[in-house]
Image: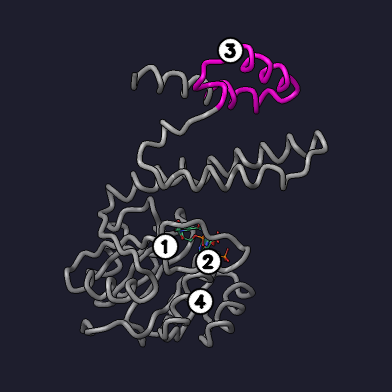
Amino acid sequence: MASHEIKTVTLIGAGKLANHLGNALKKHGFGIPQVYNRTPSQGQRLAKKLNATYTDDLNKLSFKSDLFIIAVTDRAIPEITGRLSLDGELVVHTSGTVAMSVLSKTTQRSGVLYPLQTFTGKGLVSFQKIPVCLEAAQENDLRLLADLAGKISEKIYFINSERRSYLHLAAVFAANFPHFLHTVAADLMKEHNLPLEMVRPLILQVARNTRYEDLFDLQTGPAVREDFPVIEQHRCLLSDHPEYQKIYDLITNSIIQYKKNHE
Ligand SMILES: NC(=O)c1ccc[n+]([C@@H]2O[C@H](COP(=O)([O-])OP(=O)(O)OC[C@H]3O[C@@H](n4cnc5c(N)ncnc54)[C@H](OP(=O)(O)O)[C@@H]3O)[C@@H](O)[C@H]2O)c1
């Protein structure tokens, strides 16, 4: 029987997202009766934090929940859903890439709650400004999810599985790749005894520049200037790092090509 409001949430998974989301839900008054996790240490730790009970047995999930959130690693979602029998219950996963249909055999009341943010093991992220993408098989469940998400975040979006997969792809370019490039910068700086803090204002300014619409107009550096002597100098400096040199060439050529295509 569908409820009129979500008050209680069971967490399936106790990784990075489950920790952040569980914390946000608790802070906003939701009850977390139970946490499932394959590995007891992680699951028990999160359950304790949320005043929940812990189980490592999917057959022992309590049905006293208005919502079940599957927050396990993407590859494990089909396996977990295959072992769950929650017909009549509202069940969502939190993945950017996995289609909602993965839940079709688990329940008719399936959905997705995908927060577009990077959650790490360090610090707790405030959900208030995080875009939360929602999808549900049934209209009433979409309303229930929107009510819940609206309590933890100001930014709710209704995005179907196909568009969500493009959003996730864009997020990889927006976050995961730049993060790796920051790691490369940090490596080079460390190797040449330059303090990492010197580059932090630059990284923060680049992030702030995303408030403008036409991002390519704000591109600076030798590639967009087609300053080939400097590009060649950089390539020589990277001769001991062939992997970094490949990245340098690929991105430099992409910038030059993008500029040509948009002239
Ligand atoms: N982290 C983010 O930035 C972020 C952002 C948005 C959405 N998401 C989504 O949130 C979900 C969880 O991601 P995460 O970053 O929180 O992952 P994570 O920190 O790596 O945690 C993975 C979780 O999945 C469980 N798990 C892995 N393989 C399993 C299996 N075969 N059977 C049962 N449980 C298994 C782990 O249990 P054990 O403790 O037993 O290993 C753990 O609870 C994913 O769908 C991800 O796409 C993550």
Residue 216 coordinates in the image, percent (x, y): 41, 31
Precedes in sequence: disc 3 or disc 1: 1
Magenta segment, principal secondary structure? helix
Residue underneath mark 4: 23
- Kind of residue at disc 1: Ile
| Residue 69 vs residue 58, the one in the foreground | 69
Magenta segment includes 226: yes
Circle on res. 130: 1
Magenta segment includes 133: no
Residue underneath mark 2: 125
How many angstroms separate mark 2 from mark 4 (CA)?
A: 10 Å
Q: Badge 3: how crowded within 10 Å, few (<14), some, or many (20+)?
A: few
- Kind of residue at disc 3: Phe
Q: Over which residues does the magenta segment extend?
A: 221-250
CB contact under 8 Å: marks 2 and 1:
yes
Precedes in sequence: disc 2 or disc 1: 2
Precedes in sequence: disc 3 or disc 2: 2
Question: Viewed as shown, does residue 41 lie left or right of 10?
Answer: right
